[in-house]
Image: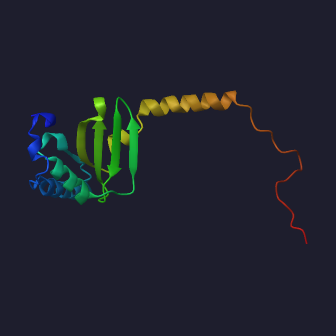
Amino acid sequence: MPRDARATCLDATVTGMALSVLAEVGRLLEALAASGQPGAIDLRSLPLTDADREQLEELLGRGEVQAELELTGRSEVWETAYPGAWWIRHRGAGDRIAAEEIAVCSVPDILLAHPDDIRAAARRLQHDLTTQQAPSAPEAGATNVETPHV
């Protein structure tokens, strides 16, 4: 059932789902630490009330890294207080949440530069460097070292 089609009278009810999701995040973090195996939890597929979502966001907290992206809509990515657990929220038309997940990984794929973009950046930078005037070289015998005055 789409999130907007459910009864709004349940939005303030805490159902215990936040604690279940938190436990799953813990299992995924253990797997990432042990084997490097990433994982994800699609929050939009779960029967979370607004109160559950707020509780989960509070329980996971905020870490040191945050990013906002402007793609086909606005996307927010933040590391939770548990390194390796990332909250990713994509917004669509009307700034409504279109997709939301907890990604358990070193760095979410959405933050990684695509190899084609890196190649294009390298070509563009090389072009920019060749079209810029090179800085003038210091004159022969000149130094940039200042002599202290005694």
Q: Position of residue 69 (x, y in %)?
A: 39, 38
Residue 45 picture location, percent across and down: 14, 40
Residue 57 image-quadrant placement: bottom left
Which quadrant would the C terminus be assigned to in this image? bottom right
Identify whether 98 is placed above or below 21.
Answer: above
Is 58 on the left or on the right of 4, as rendered? Answer: right
- Image location (x, y in percent) of residue 27: 17, 57
Q: Relative to 72, does residue 12 appear above or below in the rendering?
A: below
Q: Residue at x 74, y 35 (%)?
A: 134
Residue 78 visible? The answer is yes
Specify the color scheme.
rainbow
Q: Residue at x 19, y 58 (%)?
A: 26
| Quarter where residue 71 is shown | top left
> Which image quarter is the N terminus in?
top left
Side of 134 relative to 108 (left or right): right
Residue sitting at 27 percent across and 52 percent down?
36
Percent of width and height locating residue 10:
9, 46
Left or right: residue 135 compared with residue 128? right
Where is residue 124, by image quadrant? top right
